[in-house]
Image (tube, rainbow, N blue to C red):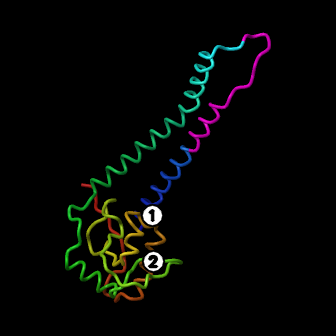
Amino acid sequence: MVELGRIYWTRQGLRLAYSAVMVWLALSLVTALMPQAIHIPGTSPSTPGEVLRGLADGVVAAVTLPGLAVVVLGILAAVVNSRDVRRRDPVRRFTRQQRREGMVRAGGGCELEVGFGRRCGRPAEHGDHFYPWSKGGSSSLQNFVAACARCNRTKRARIPSPGQQQRLERRRREYVTSATSVSVGERQPLP
């Protein structure tokens, strides 16, 4: 659970940082493009070439630092993505046995949550990777979640929050026998 929380909050932090830097970049660009209405008396008006050169210099100076931050965040995102690709389980699909055991464990119902943390009431049609396969989730029974078509499409390849993981484990205690593990989510180790 600690690993999933760390991964989830790291990715949320990267998204937030990227959004903040993009706003910073846009504001810097707008500020640099605003007309400079300062005219010093006694000097001749600048030629159009000088005005454009001054404008270009101002834009470059204004966007250098936020542009560098965008590049650094892009490199960080590429490193995270490449590590996810290296973690991918060579087996993409669950085995028939895992599917059968997972559906029995869920009682044939969807295990994912709908509004306010409640369990979805529709019958399960799919076996979903709780921790997405594309992000390094393993194709194991611990990472198997029974899902209806709607919940499976809605979840997509998003990493669930630590709160979603806790709520699913809490709900599982209600319908899973004590001999069966209620823990959910498993990630492949780096090779």
- Asked if the magenta segment contains residue 122, the reply would be no
Query: Left or right: 161 with respect to 183?
Result: right
Q: Nearer the viewer, residue 95 or 32?
A: 32
Query: Left or right: 42 with respect to 25?
Result: right
User: What type is the residue that disc 2 sits on?
Assistant: Glu
Q: Secondary structure at mark 2?
A: strand
The residues colored magenta run 23-44
> Image quadrant for the N terminus?
bottom left
Q: Is 32 situated above or below 136?
A: above
- Asked if the magenta segment contains residue 27, the reply would be yes
Query: Left or right: 91 with respect to 169?
Result: left
- Which residue has dot 2 on it? 113
User: What type is the residue that disc 1 sits on?
Assistant: Gly
Residue 78: percent from the left, percent from the top? 37, 46
Estimate the spatial distance between the alpha carbons at disc 1 and disc 2, rounded to whole Å. 18 Å
Q: Are marks 1 and 2 in contact (CB under 8 Å)?
A: no
> Image quadrant for the C terminus?
bottom left
- Which residue has dot 1 on it? 5
Residue 156 in which image quadrant: bottom left
Rendered residue at 20%/80% (across/down): 97
Q: Nearer the viewer, residue 50 or 74?
A: 50
Q: Is 19 situated above or below 7?
A: above
Residue 82: percent from the left, percent from the top? 32, 49
Which callout, 1 or 2, points to the residue nearer the camera?
2
Q: Residue furthest front?
A: 48
Residue 111: percent from the left, percent from the top? 39, 80
Q: Residues within 10 Å of mark 2 (few under 14, many from 20)?
A: some
